[in-house]
Amino acid sequence: MPQNNQQQLQQALQAAQKAQQAVQQAQSNSNPQQLQQAQQQLQQAQQQLQQVQGQAGNQANTQQQQQLQQAQQQLQQAQQSLQQLQNNKLQ
């Protein structure tokens, strides 16, 4: 994987972590504005990750593939938490 793609991978991983933290913060504070911001961060992180996955293709080594999978799992967990939080707000 070229150096530029490696940097993009790191940025995508950081974005996934930040999105997950934003969701956790929105959960603990029950703040609608934070909830909306967490949703936006989550969407941006998903877009970044998809872009990196598309560019990396088969060039990613095993460690990088694991990192991509880990970031995807983080985003899925954050999305599920966010959906649960939104569902609770609607009830």
Image (cartoon, grey):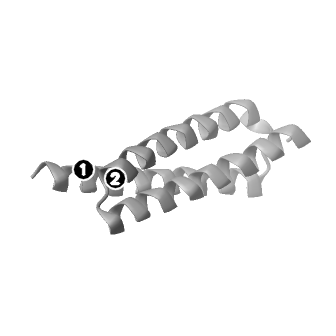
The residue positioned farthest toward the bottom in the image shown: 28
Measuring 46% from the left and 40% from the top, which residue is drawn there? 40
The residue positioned farthest toward the right in the image shown: 3
| Residue 79 rendering spot, x and y as whole percentages | 39, 50
Q: Is residue 73 visible?
A: no
Measuring 69% from the left and 50% from the top, which residue is drawn there? 65
Foreground of the two, 35 or 53:
35
Asked if marks 2 and 1 touch (Cβ < 8 Å), the reply is: yes
Say the numbered circle drawn on residue 82.
2
In the figure, is residue 58 to the left or right of 75?
Answer: right
> Compared to 4, does 83 lie above or below?
below
| Residue 21 rendering spot, x and y as whole percentages | 50, 62
Say the numbered circle drawn on residue 86.
1
The residue positioned farthest toward the left in the image shown: 91
Say the numbered circle drawn on residue 34.
none
Picture quadrant where residue 27 is located: bottom left
Question: Secondary structure beneath disc 1?
Answer: helix
Question: Secondary structure beneath disc 2?
Answer: helix
